[in-house]
Amino acid sequence: MSEEALCPLCGRPLGAVNIDRHHLVPRTFKGREQFPVHKICHRKIHSVLSERELLQHYHTWEALRAHPDIATFIAWVARKPPGFWTSTATAKGKRR
Ligand SMILES: [Zn+2]
Ligand SMILES: [Zn+2]
């Protein structure tokens, strides 16, 4: 993996810690392609969307970034360092 690698969700550099992999097409539906993303970004995707929603509507990064909750998250996480991780970060999205 290149050091210049960027997270396809938030666009920040990936850094070296707290990195997950996301399947744009869920594994349940035979998705094979996986992309390195921040752990915090990955957790956000799955806290907002079900596997079925991911399969049917959110199987592109463009669609994911356009989701209102995820757009709000991206704006919030933009100011955090690449390795930033907190288990309370996703609680924000559950407050609606
Ligand atoms: Zn990210
Ligand atoms: Zn995932």
Image (spheres, rainbow, N blue to C red):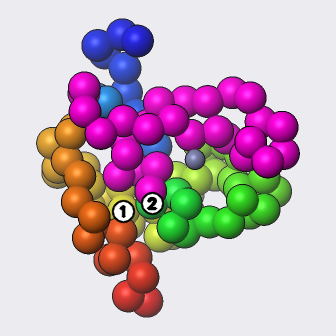
Q: Position of residue 71 (x, y in %)?
A: 44, 61
Q: Which of 65 and 50 is in front in this view?
A: 50
Q: Which of the 4 image quarters holds residue 50?
A: bottom right
Q: Residue type at mark 2: give it.
A: Lys
Regarding mark 2 in the picture, which secondary structure is present there? helix
List the residue tagged with mark 1: 73
Instruction: Looking at the image, tell me whether mark 2 or mark 1 is earlier in sequence order.
Output: 2
Regarding mark 1 in the picture, which secondary structure is present there? helix
Q: Measure the C-alpha gap from mark 2 to mark 1.
A: 8 Å
Left or right: residue 34 versus residue 8 is right
Magenta includes 33? yes
User: What's drawn in magenta, residue-wise?
Assistant: 15-43
**In this rendering, does residue 38 appear at all?**
yes
Q: Residue type at mark 1: give it.
A: Phe
Q: Are marks 2 and 1 in contact (CB under 8 Å)?
A: yes
List the residue tagged with mark 2: 44
Q: Nearer the viewer, residue 40 or 13?
A: 40
